[in-house]
Amino acid sequence: MSFNRLVADDFVVSADSITAGLWTDSNTPTITTFYTSSTQAAGSSGNYYLNVYSDSGLSSLEFATTYGNQYGSGSELFDAAVNGKSPSSTIYGQYRTLVLGDENSSFVFGGISSSDFWAISIDRNRYKESLFPGSLTLTLTNGSDTISLTDNSQAVTTVQFNDAGRVFQLVSGSAGTVYPGVNSNGYSAASGSYGWFLPDISTLLLNPLAISASINLEPNRSSNTDGNNSWKLVQAIKTGASFTLNSQETITSDYVFCRPRSSEYNYSENPSFISGSTGEVLYSSFINNPTTYITTVGLYNDTNELLAVAKLSKPLRKDFTKEALVRVKLDF
């Protein structure tokens, strides 16, 4: 066994972004069928959030929907003596902490502050790292009114960040292409954008003010009343029958270049190569013109511990007339 110490020039680090289908059937980026559990819908939690599946057997969980309201409207109060404290206010506070990181901040969608939102949270099993900006197309339909939503990641030059990572506005459009609509931003300045696309936490926040202005769909904001608002959004998604989205993963690779030079690795310590009693080369033809075959590269640390093994696709012939360059790729 022979060793060579690697130097800084032998290492190269590369990062590549890989996209893939998001949903359970990763062969297609679009799902067109949406199912909910009647048991969940009839239970106490069904008024506040709903899991959505792509198959009638409810085996393929794709995402969940919920509704948050700053003032607790749209759901029954926890305690009738404590005004404004309800599941919808709790949900609003949870997302405010997660996304904004400040309980005194407000959600501002396209310049318009909003006291409530619908949230779509993609199931964690559907992706490895994050959602892929520019791949979103969500169709919402209410009666005869339909709107197609996407994110504006392909139209902005400066990316906005908050505690949830990257933030993109939801606009009228398809697969990253912004439809001008009322203005060049893809939304009306009076009602703000259609919400936020948060790829790093796999979440969409929908602005009810803008949604209602486009397809006349708005939540029930009655005080101390279960508005069944999650179901209203699910119905609009089911009727629209098209939700397209991809996942994104950054693969970091370390490339290690191992260079057997002409004078190196031409002999072997394999017992078939030398005499066990005298240590002499068994075959005279190997003395002046030995030939070996490299099959494996091992990477060791300074304490001689094996850290990684690379196997060549086929044995690499080596003698005094040949040099080789073996590139080892380590993915993380």
Image: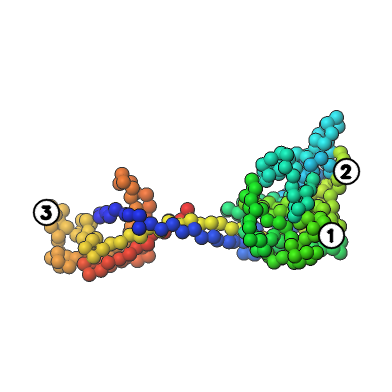
Q: Position of residue 203 (x, y in %)?
A: 68, 51
Q: Position of residue 79 (x, y in %)?
A: 83, 31
Residue at position x 69%, y 61% in the image: 152
Q: Type of residue at label 2?
A: Ser
Q: Position of residue 212 (x, y in %)?
A: 84, 56
**Residue at mark 1:** 215
For the residues marked 1 and 3, what is the alpha-carbon distance in whole angstroms?
A: 90 Å
Q: Type of residue at label 1?
A: Ile
State yes or no: discs 1 and 3 in contact (Cβ < 8 Å): no
Q: Quadrant of residue 31?
A: bottom right
**Residue at mark 3:** 278
How many labels, in total? 3
Q: Type of residue at label 3?
A: Thr
Give the class, few, some or many, for how many residues have Cα within 10 Å of label 2's Cα (few <14, many ≥20): few
Q: Is residue 48 above or below residue 178?
A: above
Residue at position x 23%, y 65% in the image: 262
**Tag 2, which secondary structure?**
loop
**Residue at mark 2:** 222
Q: Quadrant of residue 2?
A: bottom left
285 lies left or right of 228: left
Q: Position of residue 104 (x, y in %)?
A: 73, 39
Q: Earlier in the sequence, mark 2 or mark 3?
A: 2
Give the class, few, some or many, for how many residues have Cα within 10 Å of label 3's Cα (few <14, many ≥20): few
Q: Earlier in the sequence, mark 1 or mark 2?
A: 1
For the residues marked 1 and 2, what is the alpha-carbon distance in whole angstroms?
A: 20 Å
Q: Earlier in the sequence, mark 1 or mark 3?
A: 1
**Tag 3, which secondary structure?**
loop
